[in-house]
Amino acid sequence: MSATRYQATGKRKNAIARIWLEQGEGSVIINGRLSEEYFPREAWKYIVRQPFVVTETMGKYNVVANIRGGGLTGQAGALRNGISKALLQVAPHLRDKLKKEGFLTRDARKKERRKYGQKGARAKFQFSKR
């Protein structure tokens, strides 16, 4: 007999996070590892905790996540987006708080592609008049 699990998907840059949320003591397991182990930087840990801090549900839910693609910053953002969506399924009255903080909106910014005849996306080769 297991508790009700809520499933959601979060995205950021090229990272996609599948989240399962259930009642518990507040553990966060990402790809089979603890979040403290998976995200070594304090900034990444903070990003992951944000939805719980804003909704005052810290330590009430366990999170199990599978994350693919992107770097660690994108993965942390995808996890935050997914946790926020899953919290909405648990308690729809939290929508205003999460929406106000912008956690329900997928951050669509991605790396701009490099254009031909140029050094990078925006950078050009040095121009020589003579």
Image (cartoon, rainbow, N blue to C red):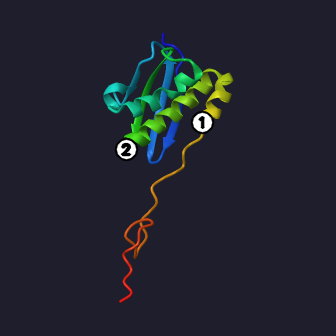
Is disc 2 placed on a helix, strand or loop?
loop
Look at the picture and state if 124 lies above or below 45.
below
- Disc 2 marks a residue whose amino acid type is Gly
Q: Residue furthest front?
A: 130
Q: Residue furthest bottom?
A: 130
- Looking at the image, can residue 8 be seen? yes
Question: Considering only order in the chain, which callout, 2 or 1, is on the residue closer to the N terminus?
Answer: 2
**Which residue is at 46% across, 41% downward?**
16
Q: Position of residue 73 (x, y in %)?
A: 41, 41
Quarter of the image holding residue 42? top left
Crowd rating for badge 2 (residues with CA inside 10 Å; few <14, some 14–19, many 20+)? few
Residue lying farthest to the top in this orientation: 1
Foreground of the two, 119 or 86: 119
Residue 5, percent from left and from top: 52, 21
In the shown orientation, is residue 78 left or right of residue 90? left
Q: Nearer the viewer, residue 13 or 68?
A: 13
Q: Which residue is mark 1?
A: 104
Check disc 2 and report the residue beneath it.
71
Image quarter of the C terminus:
bottom left
Is residue 6 at all visible to an observer of this figure? no
Residue 115 lies, with reference to residue 37, above or below; the image says below
Q: Nearer the viewer, residue 56 or 5?
A: 56
Residue 37 spot, x, y in % from top left? 31, 27
Q: Is residue 40 above or below residue 116?
A: above
The residue that appears at 48% across and 38% down in the rendered structure is 78
Q: Which mark is residue 33?
A: none
Q: Quadrant of residue 34?
A: top left
User: Amino acid type of disc 1?
Assistant: Leu
Name the residue at 50% across, 23% down.
21
Gap in angstroms between the C-alphas marked 1 and 2: 20 Å
